[in-house]
Amino acid sequence: MIRSLFSVLVTTVVLLVGCSSTPELGPSAAAAPDNGSVPSELQFTAQTLAGENFSGDSLLGEPTVLWFWAPWCPVCQREAPMVGTVAQANPGVRFVGVAAQDEVSAMQEFVDTYPVGKFTHLADTDGAVWARFGVTYQPAYAFVDPAGGIDVVKASLSEAELNERVSALSAR
């Protein structure tokens, strides 16, 4: 009887631990495609907040930072000034915001409120771009090198961490 109860308890704990949703704090990376093809993550089309068409494959060939954010996210609101500062300080690196989980009007209000209006923002209203990069929560970043190598960080970054990653990206 005790052995049976212990067995049930261990099984329950294993199942609960396996189903928990602990955030990924470390980066995940995709190797650069070796045949000159466009990585699957960059095979998307989206609309900018300005209503223009945007093609993900246009990012290939230049160092790029994708910043995944939501207008209601307090961490994103705190990070926005820092992201804007780093973007302005690195004109050789393209920054693209990927907003989701809200209406376009709220996304535009965020861009108008915080100093991130100097770079393009996508209105990912259906979350399709987020899904391509495996992003399920915000903030997150994807660092795309000119050859198409992609490093996704599913966590908030400090200004020093973002600067370090942008410097490494622009050195490639």
Image (cartoon, rainbow, N blue to C red):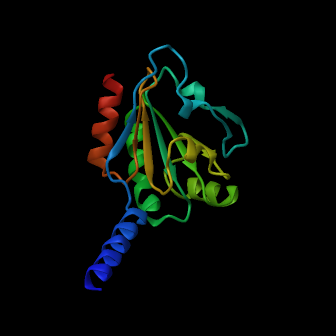
- Residue projecting furthest to the bottom: 1
The reply, left or right, for residue 134 in relation to residue 171 is: right
**Horizontal placement of 113 versus 47: left or right?**
left
Which image quadrant for residue 142? top left
Q: Residue furthest front?
A: 1
Q: Where is residue 45 drawn, in percent x and y?
A: 67, 35
* Quarter residue 153 falls in: top left
The front one of 17 and 109 is: 17
Q: Residue at x 31, y 82 (%)?
A: 5
Query: How many numbered marks have been drawn onto this rendered protein structure?
Result: 0
The percent position of residue 122, horizontal first and vertical second, equals: 62, 44
The residue shown at (56%, 46%) is: 131
Query: Can residue 102 be spotted in the picture?
Result: yes
Please give the name of the residue rendered at 30% of the width and 40% of the height, measured from the top-left corner: 163
Q: Is residue 21 visible?
A: no
Residue 74, x across and y down, in percent = 46, 66
With 168 as the anchor, is 47 left or right in this view? right
Q: Nearer the viewer, residue 15 or 111?
A: 15
Farthest-out residue, top: 35
